[in-house]
Amino acid sequence: MIDTKRTIPADQADAGSVLAEDVRDRSGRLLLSAGIPLKDKHLRVLKTWGVTQVAIWQEAPASATDSTLPSREAPPPIDETAYQQAEAVMLNAFRHCDLQQSVMQTLFDLATRRLASSIQLKGHS
């Protein structure tokens, strides 16, 4: 299932629905923040302030041809030359970072692999 944003009339919103966008009154004052699950008291606030529409997240089945889903295929192997070029660039970009820290090392590795993959693709074009 994939969450999709859907705008509905405020009086059709149910308790438990999650707001996809901030809800504001006519003057722009924030009434409810995006991301909160609606409760009965929130539904009363919407009615009291005259809110007519709300955007909520709604689960929608993922289609087999959905191009927004990430590919499940393994990425092609990266050749050594592209990796070395990417590593040289990333060492400069990360020169002020402590690569002994596992978080920084992970970011460095991911950035290097991503750049190497781009270099390799451009080389094959």
Image (cartoon, grey):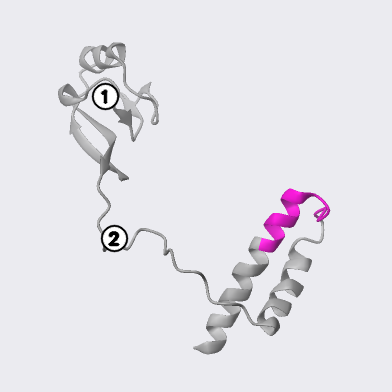
Question: Which residue is at a point 20% across and 18% down the rendered structure image?
Answer: 50
Q: Mark 2 packing: few (<14 Cα in 10 Å), some, or many (20+)?
A: few
Depth check, front residue: 55 or 4: 4
Quadrant hosting residue 28: top left
> Which element is circle 1 on?
loop
Q: In the rendered image of this protein, does residue 68 appear above or below residue 57?
A: below
Q: CA distance from mark 1 to mark 2?
A: 37 Å
Name the amino acid type tagged 2: Asp
Q: In the rendered image of this protein, does residue 74 appear above or below residue 45?
A: below
Q: Give how far across and how far down residue 81 sits, in percent.
A: 70, 84
Magenta span of residues:
97-109
Asked if the residues shown at circle 1 and circle 2 are in contact, with their CB atoms under 8 angstroms apart, the answer is no
Quadrant hosting residue 16: top left
Q: Seen from this angle, which residue lies furthest bottom? A: 124
Magenta segment includes 69: no
Q: Which residue is mark 2?
A: 66
Q: Is residue 120 left or right of residue 16?
A: right
Label 1 vs 2, first from the N-terminus: 1
Q: Give how far across and how far down residue 44 sits, in percent.
A: 24, 12
Depth check, front residue: 50 or 65: 65
Q: Which residue is mark 1?
A: 26
Name the amino acid type tagged 1: Arg
Q: Give how far across and how far down residue 47 sits, in percent.
A: 20, 15
Question: Which residue is at a point 70% across and 55% down the rendered structure image?
Answer: 106
Q: In the rendered image of this protein, does residue 3 appear above or below residue 124?
A: above
Q: Is residue 123 left or right of residue 82?
A: left
Magenta stretch, main secondary structure, is: helix
Q: Is residue 17 left or right of residue 104?
A: left
Q: Quadrant of the N terminus?
A: top left
> Which element is circle 2 on?
loop
- State the mark number for residue 52: none
